[in-house]
Amino acid sequence: MTYQEIKKALKNNRTLIWEDPIPIEGNDYTIQKIWDYDNGETARILYGPDNAPYFSEAQVFLSEIKLKKLDIKEFHERIESLIEEIEDLISEMPYKGDSETKSQKIYLINQLNQFHYAVNGIEEEDFEF
């Protein structure tokens, strides 16, 4: 990953994983903390499972850091959260009519409902490559 990609992932509360070039079987490489990654080449990390009493520390290349893939449940939870945020923003708009042609608010509500409907149709097989 690049510095910018890491910043974006952290801003969006995405989970990062260290792809250790020499992995040890049984290790959890979930990154719990990351710092000193602004030099563009390496970063310092603490990694291990969420519930661990302590974490391991390493200095790694940015190219070894990856986003954790979302499972279907995490995907739906994230999308639902974003839809709720958008709904809150739309609710602050005034009504200018009761149809899409007269009210941008109605148009946005209808489009968001269509998007929500499409998201609800996503299944596990949609994540298979």
Image (spheres, grey):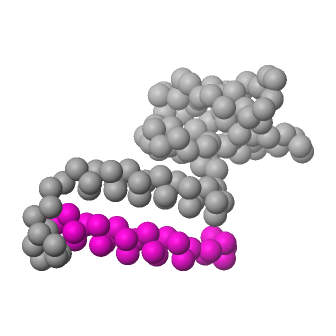
Q: Which residues are magenta?
A: 104-129
In depth, the one of 48 and 75 nearer the eye is 75
Visible residue check, residue 65: no
- Where in the figure is residue 13, as x and y percent of width and height? 53, 41
Task: Determine the residue positioned at 77% across, 36% down.
Answer: 49
The image quadrant of residue 33 is top right
Quadrant in the rendering for residue 121: bottom right
Q: Is residue 97 left or right of residue 19?
A: left
- Which quadrant would the C terminus be assigned to in this image? bottom right
**Residue in view at x 77 percent, y 25 percent:** 55
Secondary structure character of the magenta stretch overall: helix
The answer to if 125 sits in the magenta stretch is: yes
Q: Is residue 33 above or below residue 66?
A: above
Q: Position of residue 107 (x, y in %)?
A: 22, 71
The residue most toward the right is 25
Please indicate whether residue 98 sits to the left or right of residue 15 in the image: left
x 82%, y 43%: residue: 23
